[in-house]
Image (tube, coloured by chain):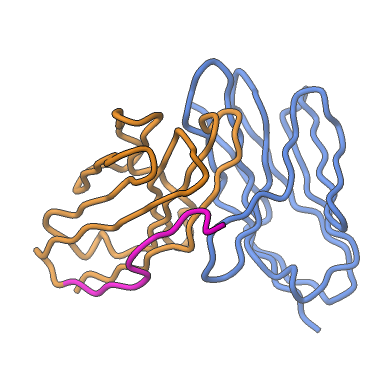
Chain colours: A orange, B blue
């Protein structure tokens, strides 16, 4: 059982380049989330999808877009990367929504923007 | 605004010693509180969940407590091991249909031999 799988694990971009982080879960969860984690800041929510077909902004959505491709997959896109987006990105999923269900996290994607 | 505060920010202890991590929250209406463990370079993993009616819950050497009146929780680690070195994150969820739990910034624990 793979759980939550993120790709790529590492990426280096130049300022202005674009890229997409992929996330897939095999637990049949309804809700999916994208977080970023920076030193001293903890995990901050970028976007979430409460169910297939819906997406909503979190705490720090500027500079990002998301797509809930189907129930399994939730991608995060950086259209024009900036150094401030250097971070570790985590995808998570939950069966019953974050208010009741446990969040299952991927292993993270480490992004550096030069 | 819902908030979760954790203390201390970091903690260094010797192997075999006990320690207690604190979490204060202002999330309302309260649904549940989870403690997550995040090993270096890995994603967080849930250790325990506390609901309104629960005061204490144990998971091996980890014991979580909840005081819903004062809105405080603690995570006690007994007989620490090197593998306990990690970040411990307190996450509080509100009831009423919210899909967004509130995260604390975590306590970084280092266990030295």
Residue A33 in the image: state x and y as whole percent.
41, 42
Residue furthest to the top in view is B96
Residue furthest to the bottom in view is B113
Residue A32 in the image: state x and y as whole percent.
42, 40
| Viewer-closest of A57 and A19 | A19
Q: Is residue B36 found left or right of A29 in the rendered image? A: right
| Viewer-closest of B91 and A26 | A26
Measuring 35% from the left and 36% from the top, which residue is drawn there? A58
Magenta: predominant secondary structure element?
Answer: strand
**Magenta includes B33?**
no
Residue B3 in the image: state x and y as whole percent.
54, 34
| Viewer-closest of B7 and A16 | A16
Q: Quadrant of the N terminus of chain A?
A: bottom right
- Whether residue B92 is situated above or below residue A84 in the rendered picture: above
Measuring 84% from the left and 68% from the top, which residue is drawn there? B80
Measuring 72% from the left and 38% from the top, which residue is drawn there? B49
Measuring 83% from the left and 60% from the top, which residue is drawn there? B19
Quadrant of residue B72 in the image? top right
**Magenta includes A6?**
yes
Q: Quadrant of the C terminus of chain A?
A: bottom left
Give the number of callouts: 0
Q: Is residue B79 found left or right of B101 in the rendered image? A: right
- Whether residue B4 is situated above or below residue A24 in the rendered picture: above
Quadrant of residue B32 in the image? top right
Q: Which residues are magenta?
A: A1-13
- Whether residue A103 is situated above or below residue A83 in the rendered picture: above
Residue B48 in the image: state x and y as whole percent.
74, 44
Residue furthest to the left in view is A16
């Amino acid at each position: 059982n793979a759980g939550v799988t993120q790709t790529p694990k590492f990426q280096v971009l130049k300022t202005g380049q674009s890229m997409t982080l992929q996330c897939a879960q095999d637990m049949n969860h309804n809700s999916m989330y994208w977080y970023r984690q920076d030193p001293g800041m903890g995990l901050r929510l970028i976007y979430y999808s409460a169910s297939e077909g819906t997406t909503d902004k979190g705490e720090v959505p500027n500079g990002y877009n998301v797509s809930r491709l189907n129930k399994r997959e939730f991608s995060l896109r950086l259209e024009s990367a900036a150094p401030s987006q250097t971070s570790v990105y985590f995808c998570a999923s939950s069966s019953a929504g974050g208010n009741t269900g446990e969040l299952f996290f991927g292993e993270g994607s480490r992004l550096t923007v030069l | 605004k819902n908030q979760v505060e954790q203390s201390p920010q970091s903690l260094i202890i010797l192997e075999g010693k006990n320690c207690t991590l604190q979490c204060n929250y202002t999330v309302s209406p309260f649904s549940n509180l989870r403690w997550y463990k995040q090993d270096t370079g890995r994603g967080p993993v849930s250790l325990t969940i506390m609901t309104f009616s629960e005061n204490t819950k144990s998971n091996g050497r980890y014991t979580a407590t909840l005081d819903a009146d004062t809105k405080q929780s603690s995570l006690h680690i007994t007989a620490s091991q090197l593998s306990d070195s990690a970040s411990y994150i307190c996450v509080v969820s509100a009831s009423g249909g919210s899909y967004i739990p509130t995260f604390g910034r975590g306590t970084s624990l280092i266990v030295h031999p």
